[in-house]
Amino acid sequence: MRLNCTLFLFVTLVSVTPLSADLRRARDLELSGQIRLAEQEYKTDGGLAYAEFLERRRHPGAMAAYEKLVTATDVNTKRQALKRLVVLALMDGNRPAAERRLNAYREAGGSGLQFTVNPRPAASTGFADIPGPIRSFSRMAALSPDLSPEELLGALARNVVTNGYQAAGNNEGLDQTEYLKLVYRYLSQAKELEKLSKEQRIVIEQCDTAQTGELLKVLGYRMRGACGGDLVLETVNASRAFLTIDSGFPLADLELALKTGKSFSYEYKPTKVNVLYGPTYWTEAREKDKPDQSFIEFFMSDPQLCRLYLGLSKLDPSTAEDLKKAMPVQRLRAFSHVLDFFGGMLQIRNGKVAVPGDPRSSAVWQEFLTVSPDNGPAFLEKLISKDDGWLAAYFEALSRMSGPALDYLTEPGRMKRFYLALRGKVTSPGPARPVFRASTDLMLLTSRLRLDANGKPHVPGNVETWKNLFINHPHGKYDGKLTKSAQNWKDPDDLLEALFALSRKAVDNEPLKMFLALSDLNRNRKEPLSPAGVEKMLKEWKLYGAQYSAFAEMPELSEKSMLQFLAAAATLNGIGDVQLKSDAVGIFQSLVALTQILNRNHLLSTGLDAAIDPILTQIPAAKNSRDLFDAGKAGLQHLLKSAGVDEKADPQVSMLALLAGAAKPADTDTHRTLVAEMQKVFDAQRLVSLKTIFDIDENLNAPSSGGKINVALVNRLSARIIEQQPPRSSLSGAERNAMAFGYWVDKHIENERKINFRAIVDKAGSDPAKLKDARSNLTGFLRDTLVGLAYIHYAPPGAQILFTNPHFVRSHDFLGVQGTNQTWRNTEVFGTGWPSSAGGRLVGSLVSLPYALAEAEQNFLIPTREQALIWGDLVPQMIVAAKVPRYWRVTPAQLHYAGLHFRAGESLLAQSAVDEKLRAKVVTALARFAPPARAEAVNAFLELGRVGDALDLVTPSEAFNLVGNLISTGDADASSPQIAEIRRLKESLPQELSVSSISPSFGTPKPTLANSYQPQLLSLRTFPTLMGYSSRILAESWESSNIYYAALADELGMKPSELNVHVPQWTKLTVEKIFATHLEDWPALLRSLRLLGQEVRQSTKQTPQGSN
Amino acid sequence: MRKFFALLVISAALVGIALYAQDAIFRVNADMVVLSFTVTDSKGKYVNGLKHTDFRVLEDGIIQKLSTFAEGNRPPIQIMDDGTSKPLSVSDNTTKETDLKGPSDAFVGTNVFVLFDTSNYMYRSFVYASDAIADFVRGLDKADSVAVYTFSRNLSRAADLTRDRNFAIAGLRKAVAGDDSALYNGLLLTLRDAAKVPGRKVVIVFSNGPDNGSMVAPDDVRAVAEDEGIPIYVISTAEVNKDPISSGVFRRIAGRTGGKAYFARTWQKQVEAFESIREDLGNSYTITYYPQKNPNEGFRKISVEIVSDTGKKLRVRARPGYRPRTS
């Protein structure tokens, strides 16, 4: 066995050489998900392979396993064990242990590892005092209590910039908002309290003293009742009392102390917070007429200075230092808005600015600014002051790119041409003037641009198609000049130039949206849409553009089917009878939505075109409710058949099984859980099962062929309808008339409730024709059930509306509020916060149902601490990312592969603290995904040996991506057990572990960024908040959660299929732990993910569990 | 048998839980109805001292057989098949408390859930409301448990259910002022929490009414309270005539769940409102029963009659009915 161990070490070191036969069995077990059995096999070996197995799985026993090997006689084994112990100690935050192991490693002949002897000096900082405890100030200033003193002032600066000021009434300045006024009032109270404290504590020894009175006066309270048990504190000054409560002063403790005669002691001292470059640097910008204030008061009084603080804190320290030297603070202050939004990608290295497209683009940048990038500080000064920020925005957008698209756009002639188009003739207002960046479209255009095989930008259709669009502009004129210039377009660059020109528009940039949507539609198609197809799509954009994301998600759908869809939609739009139209649209859209779900989960055994054909052709052909019912039923039955469901099978049971995401899963427990969850929602919505509907249909048809009516069956449906009786309204008739909305959906529900099937059947008697006609009464129920099936598939974790409002599904309004036509638009939430309505409901088509449903349910999640501050668009996207992907097709090897990437990333970062060469490679790789300032901060922490702090700055997706990058460049440390395993896996399972397999397995849907709900990994840099899209794009660029959950599941030896249940649950728990300060505070999200991980680990047995 | 009954009452709200005691397995289903009500005379004064034999409870006109009976915060009594009664032991230390959520003797006293509006709409009255709630918590009966929840856009559990008044007040005093108001979302979540706790419970909402963030309608929330048998009391700081829609909704929600709505614009009136609620809690009767067979799966109308009140001079205030849980 010892021989085997030695052999294995050799294998590890050369990394991709096949394993020994004895260990192969262990590995096979591991890869098949039988972790416990694999562990036993490895344990039998007991050597390095066992220890590395444990480390790969992040097992707490890994360190002990390596410990056993440090006395090994084989020097290679010993060295490797010691090296891994150094890394593990660093990850554990135990520097003394790491140093001890490092010494032992060197003594064993190891080399190449040492802590940095002279780490670079940190950015110069000073300190300022904030009166009172940090927690109180954070509460008042809406800052996360998790912020460190180093981070606090930057977060405060952001809140002051975004929430602190509003336009003054006379429009000539800024007024403080209520938020900022309260912060100032709090500071004033805190100063008073500080005066009452002695030796940094507020101490009240006795109740009946002047000191008590003084304290209560400052707090805004007084005593009611005499000192002792009857004493109660009550408000006397509401403004002060509000500050006392809102800042979290321990009033209840004070009251208790006064009641019980015990002393009250509360630490009350100023908090020292870090100030970048020290307070003096900032006060130099003080205007003379400003009164003497404390630093913090002065700081908050100047939003522009706050913005500069933000801007400079986004630069890496050496770049900021260079810029500071080049520009006095007063001048920098004038461009603070540009630095804040577009400074994050600026970097000076060795005196030179790293420009995107370097070296080819260098001359163009010099031409733009009349300064060479080699003269770093001067170049940056010119850049931020040029064209009110347009050039800086361009620089930033290009800097975020990489690969062929960047090469294309930075070709000198093109780069210049596109910038001039973007800038236009009138540069003001610049893109940094608004509260959020006005360069959304520019960022989308550059980050989503794709090149065809010929090296040219992909143009859906052809240039002629777009030329016609701009010249004829069927939806209204875009731009007079572009209409004129379009006459001469010949090349894709002509179109791109126009799109860059349109990117400067803050609103209604329709052509760019069309271009991106159709580019995404073509992205995964084997054959791109024909020019005629594109032309049709462009023509129909206004009405049906929102539906194109469904086409983008189903690249297997032929162009013919897409055009059929548009024709069907047009037919349905033309139906005059609103009830029939609602039913027809509802049945059509829900069947398409169900097709989309089945296709996404690879459940269609026939071609997509064949599966969807009856839906596209038969439903629009229906002339009345009876026809519609027949068409809907036929469409569904055909869909089930296309998914391999036997004709005789129960349609309800079969559909629920498919909606769980798998037809015949091996993990039946998980599948059953998912089906049960969906069934609960289905029942709560009092929907009628497909089986009941179809049975009644057949029963009503029976007399035509000599059969009899089954009265019991009719009664069953009648009973279900009676269950729908809504509770009596809490509104009076007058209130309903005044306040209620949604006439058509109310009518739909009312009509259904009025249906008495028993009476209808009785009335029809034995007349087969009348009984057949009676089937038209089933149409509304079929619509509700089909719509409901789409709803239950996406039901968010912690959902409440679906369980409380039994009419939520039925209330889906396919028409929209009267006077609007929302039938084919995105799904929207309506009726929020209107207590006199029937509650919120969803309006529009079903195309963005997952997001709308998540948006509607998000506020039912309960924050574990104070009120959440930033949920907004972030949480719906997190819920969508949890509910849309399914993990039935994910293999144990894929799960392990994803987990290994994340853990390898963290492990390599830790190792970098003692391996200078590796650190340089790791930081370079990280800089491809993280902005320069953060990459440098990670570098600095690693130099200091502060691995924990460095890891806090790296997101799971960055850790994941940097490993892929290091492996592709050959820069990963081959001796790392995770890297070695990744290589072995990749070599043995190239298809299973290809990018195209991993991306949909652990990616997230990106309906805004990629116009599709198909989960995918784009590995983009995390986006900032953008005007118009707010945090939605930011949230879509966040790919870390699912990667983290996958790694956690792998670490704990779970089956991939279990993620189907765990990911939604974990997402709910993660969301409930988020306490962030602002929209871009993703470190807060990272913190909550890690907290979740700790909780899950604690609640799960630490020994790996497999499926054996 | 005594132990069995204690378990039964405690577990009433826990659906499908099987409790194991010695050799027997006692299965408790969730059908048991908990009904709290007050009886007042023609002058509106509480009538105390009535016995279980004074009451007749009907569901859709069907007479029900009572299982337990309690007055105010006194321990409940078990009603035997022959109509006699015997006390339920609170201190029975063989009770399997570990399986249960909430205080061990949760069936004694009331579980009071206070829901405090900390949204922008309460900005000006925030501290006074906080004082009034603190007073209310201090004055609760020793047997009562109290939880303090706050809401703005989201719900926040400031203090979980406790008999420790200081803990509850400390939670209350740490409430953070928020922004939007999602009153009915918050109320729904509070009811969901309350429904998980065994024993008698009420929800007291302190809000001035406006709601700009809820996705659920008041009517649906009220239905949950009705079905779970949880009376809702509302104290609003707004003037009734300034927001007739909200005040109308408050009245109906409270009325139909067996609670009350108060419109107390001043701090003193708020204190009085709380005092009135406290009195209500101390002067109410609580009975439980398993419904007799009833084909009605929809709304079942409950009526409580006082057998001894032949002249019909007394007034019973109870929830009007409920919808049975669907299996």
Image: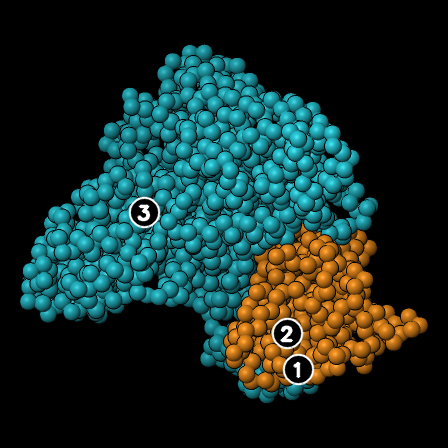
A457 left or right of A679? left
Chain ID, mark 2: B
In the figure, B282 relative to A41: above or below?
A: below
In the figure, B67 relative to A1079: above or below?
A: below
- The residue located at (47%, 53%) in the rendering is A673
Chain ID, mark 3: A
Labels 3 and 2 within one chain: no
Q: CA distance from mark 3 to mark 1?
A: 56 Å
Residue toward you, B200 or A840 = B200
Chain ID, mark 1: B
Residue toward you, A77 or A424 = A77
Residue identified by numbered label 1: B88
Chain B's colour? orange
| Quadrant where the image shows the C terminus of chain A | bottom left
A939 left or right of A269? left
Q: Nearer the viewer, mark 3 or mark 1?
A: 1
- The outermost residue toward the front is A706
Say which mark, if any, is on residue A891. 3
**Percent coordinates x, y for residue B91 in the rendering:** 60, 85
In the figure, A631 relative to B58: above or below?
A: above
Q: Nearer the viewer, mark 3 or mark 2?
A: 2
- The residue located at (70%, 57%) in the rendering is B323
**Amino acid type shown at disc 3:** Thr
Residue toward you, A681 or A328 = A681
Q: Quadrant of residue B170?
A: bottom right
**Amino acid type shown at disc 2:** Val
Chain A's colour? cyan
**Percent coordinates x, y for residue A306 in the rendering:** 46, 51
